[in-house]
Image (spheres, helix red, strand yellow):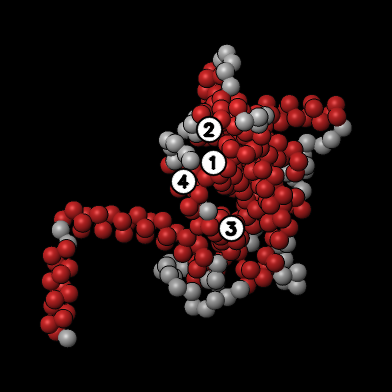
Amino acid sequence: MKSDSKSLIGHLADWLNWPRFIFAITLIFFLTSILFPFYWMISSSFKTYAEIGGREPVYVPSALRLDAYRELFDPNDPKFQNFGQNVLNSIKVAVPTAIIAVILAVLGAYAIARLHFRGKNIMLNSILMIYLFPGVLLIIPLFAMLAQIGAKLGFQVQDNLGVLVFTYLAQTLPVALYMLTNYFRTIPDEIEQAGLIDGCTRFQVIWRITLPLAIPALVSVTIYTFMIAWNEFLYALVFLNSRELFTMPIKINAIFNDPTPRPHVVMAASTIMTIPVVILFLAMERFLEEGLTAGGVKG
């Protein structure tokens, strides 16, 4: 056993050199910096207030307490937060935002990538420049514009999830359009021309040829736009006043600013908000990698 141990150490010593050692240390550092905050958030959701607020950090909770999760979801809890409704509100906003943004971006990006008209590059760059402006600069004119439209058409701007979806499109559509335009340009035009020669209309070409080849990009854009709407805070804070319509980021902020500090509840709510996005990324990892790195000929 001792000789085997020495042999293993010897093989390790032969394999390990300075570049590999530096790479391993760097990799461990980045993995720790990424995974440890996630672990701390989850573990803190099971801790007591004393364990979280103590001077000495508690890395492992003494027990898996579900008090924070009961407060979020159990109607029998005296401090019931009805967090399930907030989860549902976020779904109602994020899913339509992602779907509508992808549909509109597909049509717009295809037109820019394939059709020839004056000023299309200027239009694409102008759309991207809108995305570069901070959301706080756009929210006041956007709110004023929607308020005037709502007054004429007879709908309320505040406490309206449909209006919130529209405001999210102002943030997600430019980047979705830009990403899909660059991807459509990598698809050989000859494939689509062959479809047109065979008698397909332009929409049939898009549906039967372009979209199947662009599935990785569509998945990437869908997840990205969904994530923006899922995590958005500023616009929801301005457009939503009713607690029943709060999305998860607004509800977490309300719990955090409660006069009675309950950091374990904040951590539990943050965990519930984070896990679906992580699962979505892991499930679609293959499509994300292809969508973000693909280029050249498809076929």
Residue type, mark 2 in image: Ile
Q: Earlier in the sequence, mark 4 or mark 3?
A: 3
Q: Are marks 2 and 1 in contact (CB under 8 Å)?
A: yes
Identify the residue at horizontal 69%, vertical 60% (top origin). 83
Residue type, mark 1 in image: Leu
Q: How many marks?
A: 4
> Which mark is nearer the camera, 4 or 3?
4
Q: In this view of the protein, which residue sits in the foreground, 81 or 232? A: 232
Give the structural element (helix, strand or loop) at label 1.
helix
Residue at the disc numbered 2:
191
Q: Are marks 1 and 4 in contact (CB under 8 Å)?
A: no
Q: Earlier in the sequence, mark 3 or mark 1?
A: 1
Give the structural element (helix, strand or loop) at label 4.
helix
Q: Say the numbered circle drawn on residue 57.
A: none
Q: In this view of the protein, which residue sits in the foreground, 164 or 91? A: 91
Q: Is residue 141 left or right of residue 281?
A: right
Q: Separation of disc 4 and disc 2 at Cα?
A: 20 Å
Residue type, mark 4 in image: Glu
Identify the residue at horizontal 87%, vertical 32% (top origin). 154
> Which mark is nearer the camera, 1 or 4?
1
